[in-house]
Image (cartoon, coloured by chain):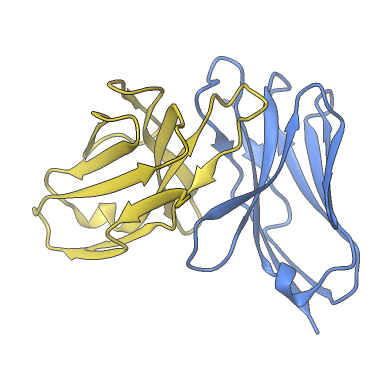
């Protein structure tokens, strides 16, 4: 099993450009998440999904959109990138967090720089 | 506001020492608590998950305890090694937000030779 994979690993954007980050998991997990990690701020939840076709806002959703058209994929979009979105983005997946199988599995991250 | 706090932010110990990392949470109504490890430039790896009905979980040299009534969890690392150097984070899904984990900001551990 590949676990959770993220594409791309690194990206540099100019202000105003758009891009999509792709997350894929092969563990048949229902729940998927997008986090950003910034120095001194810890991990902050951007958006999440509790199943195919569902999405919900997290702690810092502004400037981002997501889609979960297939159970194994969760896409994070930046429509008009801003320097404040420079960060490391992590995708994660799990079975229900309330269940005994509720461990969260993380991808390796995408390092995004917006100039 | 439901918060998870980890103190200290950084810790340095000599190889071989036993050590304890602390995690506190503001609301005792949690489903479970997880401990993660993050190496520099890498994603997070789940180490241990303690269900709310459990008091502790063990994996090798790691032992995690949970005391919901006091809002505290500890991660005990026995006989520390330089390879244990990493950032350790705890996280919990609070009831009412069961689909989401709230993370602490982590303790950066360095084990020196």
Residue B25 position, x and y percent, is 70, 33
Task: Please state if A45 lies on the left or on the right of A98 as rendered.
Answer: left
- Mark yes or no: residue B66 visible: yes
Q: Quadrant of the C terminus of chain B?
A: bottom right
Location of residue B26 (image quadrant): top right
- Mark yes or no: residue A115 visible: no
The residue at the point 59 percent across, 52 percent down is B45
The residue at the point 84 percent across, 23 percent down is B69
Q: Quadrant of the N terminus of chain B?
A: top right
- In the rendered image, the residue lying farthest to the top is B96
Q: Nearer the viewer, residue B55 or B69?
A: B55
In the image, which lettered chain appears yellow?
A
Residue A61 position, x and y percent, is 30, 34
- In the rendered image, the residue lying farthest to the front is A1
- In the rendered image, the residue lying farthest to the left is A16
- Above or below, B63 against B19 in this view is above
Location of residue B50 (image quadrant): top right
The residue at the point 30 percent across, 37 percent down is A74
- Above or below, B106 against B68 in this view is below
In the image, which lettered chain appears blue?
B
Residue B58 position, x and y percent, is 84, 45
Task: Please state if A33 lies on the left or on the right of B1 as rendered.
Answer: left
Q: Nearer the viewer, residue B41 or A27?
A: A27
Q: Nearer the viewer, residue A29 or B20?
A: A29
Count of picture labels: 0
Q: Nearer the viewer, residue A76 or B20?
A: A76
Task: Please state if A104 lies on the left or on the right of A15 as rendered.
Answer: right
């Amino acid at each position: 099993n590949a676990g959770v994979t993220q594409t791309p690993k690194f990206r540099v954007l100019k202000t105003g450009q758009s891009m999509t980050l792709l997350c894929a998991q092969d563990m048949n997990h229902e729940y998927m998440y997008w986090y950003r990690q910034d120095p001194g701020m810890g991990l902050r939840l951007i958006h999440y999904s509790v199943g195919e076709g569902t999405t919900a806002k997290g702690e810092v959703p502004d400037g981002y959109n997501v889609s979960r058209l297939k159970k194994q994929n969760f896409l994070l979009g930046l429509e008009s990138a801003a320097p404040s979105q420079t960060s490391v983005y992590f995708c994660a997946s799990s079975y229900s967090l309330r269940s005994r199988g509720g461990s969260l599995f993380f991808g390796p991250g995408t390092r995004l720089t917006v100039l | 506001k439901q918060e998870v706090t980890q103190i200290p932010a950084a810790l340095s110990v000599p190889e071989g020492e036993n050590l304890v990392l602390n995690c506190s949470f503001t609301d005792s109504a949690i489903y479970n608590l997880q401990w993660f490890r993050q190496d520099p430039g890498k994603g997070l790896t789940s180490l241990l998950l303690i269900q709310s009905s459990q008091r502790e979980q063990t994996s090798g040299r790691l032992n995690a305890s949970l005391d919901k009534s006091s809002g505290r969890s500890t991660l005990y690392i026995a006989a520390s090694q330089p390879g244990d150097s990493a950032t350790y984070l705890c996280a919990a899904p609070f009831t009412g937000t069961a689909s989401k984990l709230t993370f602490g900001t982590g303790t950066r551990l360095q084990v020196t030779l």
